[in-house]
Image (spheres, rainbow, N blue to C red):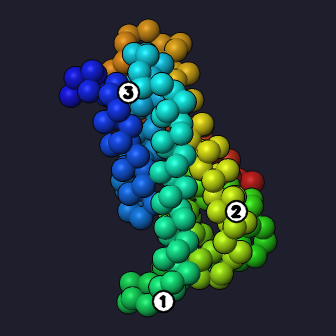
Amino acid sequence: MPIDLLTTPWALAVMSVLVLGDAFIVVIPGEVAVTALGAISASAGAPPLWAVILCAALAAASGDIACYLIGRTVGIDRWGWMRTVRVQRALQWARLRLDAGTATVLFTARFVPFARLAINLVAGASRIHAPRYFALVLLAAAGWAVYQASVGALVATFLPGGPVVAVIVSIAVAIGLGALIDVLTRRLRR
């Protein structure tokens, strides 16, 4: 795909769809799309970084809110797959975390794909106060979008080689940072 296509408004639309889809199907590369467009923005000058961040934040918040509404209206035990041991463990984990501190959990879960899905479904099923939840999700999504796009933009700014190199390296850096955060989080829990 020529880089020129990634500098058009269509790139923002595709990124937004990927981020929104990532709320439901966690293997969709929403994070990668935001990081890549952050790198393209810094290296090619378009789309504007603020637009990447805004579109990513709105798509992420919309996906999280949709999961909340599904949890609130459908519940978390309607279908057979929701009653499997693995899913029930994840939902119980989410319940305990939400009871401990809603704001902290929502901000943290925004960066952890499977946790994000479980937390948002349980938040809805638990009937957490919607206006407070929506405000926290918007803030968490904005912070996430700034982080993801900034990783790409910073790598592209300091790395010579053009947009393609910037995208590849920024995605590797973002994955590396995510892995490092996972390792540190596990060690802190012990």
Label 2, label 1: how far apart the Cα atoms are: 22 Å
Is 50 placed above or below 21 here? above
SS at mark 3 in the image: helix
Q: Amino acid at mark 2?
A: Val
Label 2, label 3: how far apart the Cα atoms are: 31 Å
- Residue 142 rendering spot, x and y as whole percentages: 62, 45
User: Which tag, 2 or 1, sits closer to the chain's start?
Assistant: 1
Left or right side of 90 for 128: right
In the foreground, 188 or 150? 150
In the foreground, 185 or 45? 45
Q: Which residue is mark 1?
A: 77
Q: Amino acid at mark 1?
A: Asp
Q: Which residue is mark 2?
A: 105
SS at mark 2 in the image: helix
User: Which tag, 2 or 3, sits closer to the chain's start?
Assistant: 2
Instruction: Tell me the mark number nearer the camera, choosing from 3 and 1.
Output: 1
Mark 3 Cα within 10 Å, few/some/many (few <14, many 20+)? some
Residue at the image position 38 percent from the left and 37 percent from the top = 12
Could you say which quadrant of the image residue 130 lies in? Answer: bottom right
